[in-house]
Every structure is written in C-alpha cells, then in structure tokens.
Image (cartoon, coloured by chain):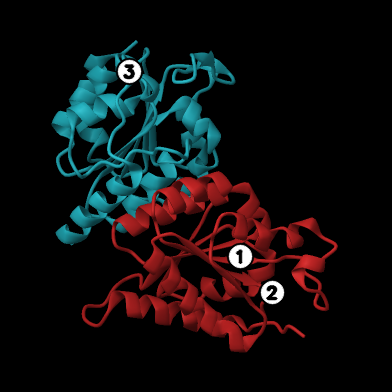
C-alpha cells in the first residue's frame, strides 16, 4: 500500500539537489527556487517551505506562468523545481511543449495526484484527473515515476538529473498527500 | 499612434546590457535591430513573455530585463501581472505594445479592443509604477527612467501595426538556441 511522504524528507531532497547543482564554494542566496501553483496534495511541503529561509518560493497564478518563470531562471543558471497538481499539468500542456520540450529547457516537476485512492492504482481511479496524468506524460514522452512512500524520495534527485541530462521535462508524481 | 519599429529603435539604443524578451510582432524588427545573444523571443507559447521575463529578472538581479509584450499575448496569461507583482522584481520593465488587434492572425480585434487599460490593471495588481505613453517624444523623455527605476514597471505603449509579423518574416534563431545563447552569455557574466 502507498504511504504519505513527510515534507521534511522532500525538502531535504530539494536542498541536496540544489547544493549539488551549485557545487562547493561561495554561498548562494537563495540556495534554489521552488516555483509553485499551490497543490492541496503537497500542502504540507508548501507549509514547510514557508519556514525555509534558504529556498525561495515563487507562487504563480497559473502553471503557464510557472513554466515560463522556471525557464527564465534556468537561463540565468539558477536551479529550479516546479510543484504543481495534475490539473495544472492538463492546463499547461502547450507551454510545457513549447518551453521544456521544443525549447529544450530542463524542468523537473513534482505533480500531485489529488484524489488518488490509496487502495487503487491511478489507472483504476474513478477520477479522470487521476487516471489521465501518467498516460498524458507518456504521450508527450516525458519520463516520470510515482513516489509511493518514503523509500521513493530518491526518485526526486533521479528525475531532476534526468531532466538535466535530456534537456527537457521529467516528473515525479506524488501518489498520496504528503505528511 | 507610435510605430513599433520606432519604439524598438529607441530601446535598442538605450538598453545597455539588458536582456530583452520580444514576442509576436516585435520579434522580426527586434531581430534586425539587436541581433545579439541577450534576447530571447517568446515563440511557441504565446502569452508567456511576461513570466519568462520575471524568471530572468529574478535570476539576474543585477541586469535590467525588458519585456516587449503584446495586448493579445498578455490577455492569454493576464494572471502574470499578479505573479510579477507578488515576486516584485526591482529590475523588470514590462512594455505593453497595445494595438488592439491580433495582428499576426489577421488583425481581429482583441477582447475589449482599445478599451482595455493594461496600465491600470498592472497598477491594481501591484506593480510599483505604471504609465501610458502615446507619442515618441513622451517615450524619449520617459525611457531613461523606465529602464532604470525600481520595478516592476509597466508602460502601456499605444501603437499602430508593425511592418512585419512572424508569419511574413524569415524565421529567427530557434527558441532552444536562443535559450542556450542567453544562458551561456548570462552565466558567463556571473
């Protein structure tokens, strides 16, 4: 059965990614950027990020904004993670195609599967917004994996690296609401 | 009404090391006026110029970032006004070329046409300062402040139609190459 992942583990993973990206040497403020359109499924992470001084969170009106802000930051050499919900993935497919795919901008997404039933594989969910997220990512050829418990936190750096290596999008889907 | 090309000439002469983000009908003229690696066109995701400019401004706080937006374009991501105001980049100048039509697709009137006041919207969203400019003389006077005052700044520029659109112009550098060029140049500058 899937389990909720504590927000502290997720934020530690973000920090390790950003530290690795920055490399040793001079201190950076902020350490990295989290671009967010608030997601109910990941609200405990967003709440913890509010207290996290080393990371800067930019809250966007739409996922289209989030993608473009992330691209602008990438062009200046800044490390970025985008946190959205499956509904935001659906809302922003043209921007993801234009910026991250055609524009070859490496963007790593944390995508919340709001309303995913604990006892069901997403493909069997009674909610279309849960069922269609992974197939949509497959249609676009976007590498993705599902975080189903604390042991899967390692997927975060793995898929962040994938986005950098392929110069395009990669995503981790958040299976259950974070703790 | 100002000619977009005349506005762009003034900006090209005054921009210094600013990163510029043209979109739609400002793209072809800007490529000719400023064929450098410090511009990135919003191509293939209409409406994204202002948010792209925000990301650049946040990541390069020591440089000015100038967005050449269109009214039809901004309407596609109007919420970016609040996103920008919330992030409050001090180095962002958002120029809104307002012609009241979707020039590229055949000059259909934009929703609300010339009646939509983008400067008022930006001010209400929380931009630090906004203005509307209708003549080149007025633009010449205000341009130094627009490019140096603390942002975010929005100037709504009342324009006629550009001579060219992306549909009747030769293609520019592909977007992914522009991204790589700007990243190389800005990262190298530190």
Q: Colour of chain A?
A: red
Helix, strand or loop at mark 3: loop
Q: Which residue is mark 1?
A: A111
Q: Is residue B92 left or right of residue A179?
A: left
Q: Is residue A118 above or below residue B157?
A: below
Q: Quadrant of residue A10?
A: bottom right
Q: Is residue A93 above or below residue B73?
A: below
Answer with mark 1 or mark 2, whichever residue precedes in sequence.
1
Which residue occupies the foreground of this view, B39 or B58? B39
- Can residue A73 be seen at all in this image of the molecule? yes
The subunit letter for the residue under badge 3 reads B
The residue sitting at 58% across, 48% down in the picture is: A92
- Can residue B141 be seen at all in this image of the molecule? no
- Disc 3 and disc 1: Cα gap in Å? 40 Å
Q: Is residue B63 above or below residue B145?
A: below
Residue B164's mark? 3
Picture coordinates of residue B167, whole percent (x, y): 39, 22
Helix, strand or loop at mark 1: strand
The subunit letter for the residue under badge 2 reads A
Helix, strand or loop at mark 2: loop
Q: Which residue is mark 2?
A: A175
Which residue occupies the foreground of this view, A12 or A164? A164
Q: Dot 2, how many residues are within 10 Å of its Cα: few (below 14), some (14-19), or many (20+)?
A: many
- State the residue lying farthest toward the right: A126
Q: Dot 1, how many residues are within 10 Å of its Cα: few (below 14), some (14-19), or many (20+)?
A: many
Q: Quadrant for the N terminus of chain A, please.
A: bottom right
């Amino acid at each position: 059965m899937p389990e909720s992942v504590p927000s502290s583990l997720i934020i530690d993973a973000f920090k390790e990614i950003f530290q690795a990206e920055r490399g040793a040497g001079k201190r950076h403020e902020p350490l990295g950027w989290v671009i967010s359109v608030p997601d109910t499924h990941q609200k405990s992470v967003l709440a913890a990020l509010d207290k996290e001084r080393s990371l800067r969170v930019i809250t966007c009106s739409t996922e289209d904004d989030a993608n473009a802000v992330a691209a602008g930051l990438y062009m200046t050499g800044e490390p970025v993670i985008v946190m959205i919900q499956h509904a935001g993935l659906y809302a922003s497919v043209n921007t993801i195609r234009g910026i991250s795919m055609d524009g070859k901008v490496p963007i790593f997404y944390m995508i919340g599967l709001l309303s995913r039933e604990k006892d069901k594989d997403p493909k069997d969910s009674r909610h279309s917004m849960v069922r269609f997220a992974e197939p949509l990512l497959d249609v676009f050829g976007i590498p993705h994996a599902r975080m189903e418990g604390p042991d899967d936190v390692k997927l975060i750096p793995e898929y962040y690296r994938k986005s950098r290596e392929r110069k395009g999008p990669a995503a981790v889907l958040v299976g259950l609401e974070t703790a | 009404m100002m000619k977009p090309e005349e506005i762009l000439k003034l900006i090209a002469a005054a921009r210094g090391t600013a990163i510029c983000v043209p979109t739609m009908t400002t793209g072809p003229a800007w490529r000719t006026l400023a064929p450098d690696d410090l511009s990135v066109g919003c191509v293939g995701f209409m409406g994204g110029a202002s948010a792209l400019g925000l990301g650049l401004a946040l990541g390069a706080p020591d440089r000015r970032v100038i967005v050449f937006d269109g009214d039809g374009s901004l309407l596609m991501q109007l919420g970016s006004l609040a996103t920008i105001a919330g992030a409050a980049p001090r180095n962002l100048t958002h120029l809104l070329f307002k012609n009241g039509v979707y020039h590229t697709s055949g000059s259909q009137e934009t929703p609300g046409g010339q009646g939509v006041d983008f400067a008022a919207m930006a001010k209400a969203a929380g931009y630090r300062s906004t203005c509307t400019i209708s003549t080149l003389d007025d633009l010449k006077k205000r341009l130094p402040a627009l490019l140096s005052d603390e942002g975010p700044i929005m100037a709504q520029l009342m324009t006629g139609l550009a001579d060219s659109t992306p549909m009747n112009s030769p293609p520019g550098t592909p977007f992914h190459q522009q991204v790589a060029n700007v990243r190389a140049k800005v990262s190298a500058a530190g």
